[in-house]
Image: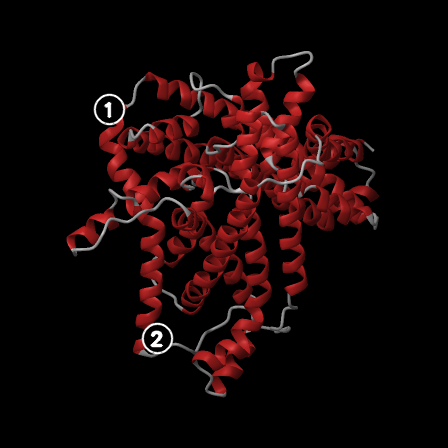
Amino acid sequence: MAVTAAGAAALLTVLALCLGSLAVAAAQGGLAGGFSAPDLRALRFTVLQATLSSALSVGLAVPVTRALARRRFPGRDAALSLLGAPFLLPVIVAVIGVIAVWGRSGWLSEISLGLGGPRLDVYGLPGVVIVHVFFNLPLAARLMLQACAEVPAERWRVAAQLGMEGRALFAAVEWPALRSAAAAAFALTFLVCATSFAAALALGGGPRATTLEVAIYEAARYEFDLGRAARLAALQAGVCALAAGLAYAARAPMAAGAGVLRQAERFDGRGAWARAGDAAVLIAAAAFLLAPIAAIMLRGAPSLFLLGPEVLAAAARTAAVAVASAALCVAAALSLAALVTALQTRGRRGAALADLAGLAPVAASPFVIGVGVIVALRSFADPFALAMPLTALINALAATPFALRILTPALRLGWEEHGRLAASLGLTGATRLRAVYGARLRGPLGFSAGLAAALSAGDLGVIALFATPDAPTLPLLMHLLASSRQLDAAMAAALVLLALCLALFRLFDLAGRSAR
């Protein structure tokens, strides 16, 4: 009963923050005002950049996936780890790195000038798409690489006996395995890109390159037009729901079939041209992913002396918000995961609904949630005086779907292994929790906390709504420095933020591993 009550309380809190805030904003401002020309431009740009970013991310991930799937080479494990690195990288850090590589004074512009060409203009649609592909190409490749690993070894042997190579092999074996993962990757990246804020704010390039999320922020922060913010948030949620529905309808069943051997040996692509092509693909992908990080390190390290004491204060605020956010996220996700697992093990139909409701923050606008909290609190408290706690709360909400996906399988596996035995022995309470789930949960709990802390530390979102410029977090300080053309100082602050995010993730992750 205690587990069910805690999970139900967490579920109601998530829904209240996601849906209740929208209702509060709508009640204050109304939903009947319609959409202006700037709103429709923001809608068009959101759909355009999300579609382009998702298509490029998934399309470019296909050759990267094929190269990684059929090659075994020294450093392959490091290459696979690199695919997970951008997810921990703060978006504002990636933006600064992209400007250093692709901007008017960036590496590629200098190369272009040396060859007699023009300087590159990274602002507007190109810059937003580049940042989104930087983050989502590795994610799509990881999803599709896992799908490739599910193809039975027998299929590859049959294809080799039939002499299949190139397009024929791709059409007969690889694409049937990849298409479901590709649809899922497209939907996920579309949702991420459609709700993106930091990249569009820093690189949008004016009113004609504004996303719905930036428009919601402007309506909530500068105009305090709650009706417009609510209408835009409802529109954004509708776009996300439509994209998810289309991806669900376009999904295909796994066509690889069952098999006995799972460690597949690939017999294709052994020619010199195929090896050279795969090498070129992997080198190009590594250069694309590593160049922004290298630019930050090379330009940020010598500029560290430009940073004043305000950076240490911002780093301390960022770390405090991140730790609080991680604690709140893990508590909520663990309660939700326990509720979902309990409903599943009892055969209740509500398990799928509870699991789906836990994903609501993915499509919710954090700015509308922030506005709803402001409206709810302003009658008896100053919400802006509570900027840091509220930022921690909303950042924890944003990370909860990821932690839920990490913790639920661990709980389910613990129940399958020891749950019935513990029930037959009459174990209850903390004793049952330790016996059934203790060993399975420590690692996922540490990983979830580290992920939530890193995501919160690097977030330039809600803090831009609540905080004042005299008390910024590191991401907000970076944005202020870059906006005032102090790019060297922004690079140095980016380096500090990158180190802080990686340190927080590593600290929590190692704590979970060492507790095993």
The residue lying toward the viewer, choosing from 368 and 289, is 368
Q: In x, y percent, where is residue 240?
A: 62, 49
Q: In x, y percent, where is residue 160?
A: 47, 83
Quadrant, the N terminus: top right
In the image, farthest residue toward the bottom: 162
In the image, farthest residue toward the front: 37
- Within 10 Å of disc 1 (Cα), the crowding (few <14, some 14-19, many 20+) is few
Q: In x, y percent, where is residue 342?
A: 78, 43
Residue drawn at x 66%, y 50% is: 241
Of labels 1 and 2, earlier in sequence is 2
| Amino acid on which disc 1 is placed | Phe
Dot 1: element: helix
In the image, farthest residue toward the top: 380
- Within 10 Å of disc 2 (Cα), the crowding (few <14, some 14-19, many 20+) is some
Q: Is residue 266 visible?
A: yes
Residue drawn at x 83%, y 44% is: 424
Q: Is residue 89 above or below residue 385?
A: below
Instruction: Locate residue 332: give its quadrant.
Output: top right
Q: How many marks?
A: 2
Q: Is residue 403 above or below residue 156?
A: above
Query: Which residue is labeled 2 in the image?
Result: 274
Instruction: Locate residue 439: give its quadrant.
Output: top right
The residue lying toward the viewer, choosing from 57 and 233, is 233
Give the side of residue 314 with respect to residue 367, left or right: left
Q: In x, y percent, where is residue 306?
A: 25, 24
Query: Which residue is labeled 1 in the image?
Result: 305
Gap between marks 1 and 2, in whole Å? 48 Å
Dot 2: element: helix
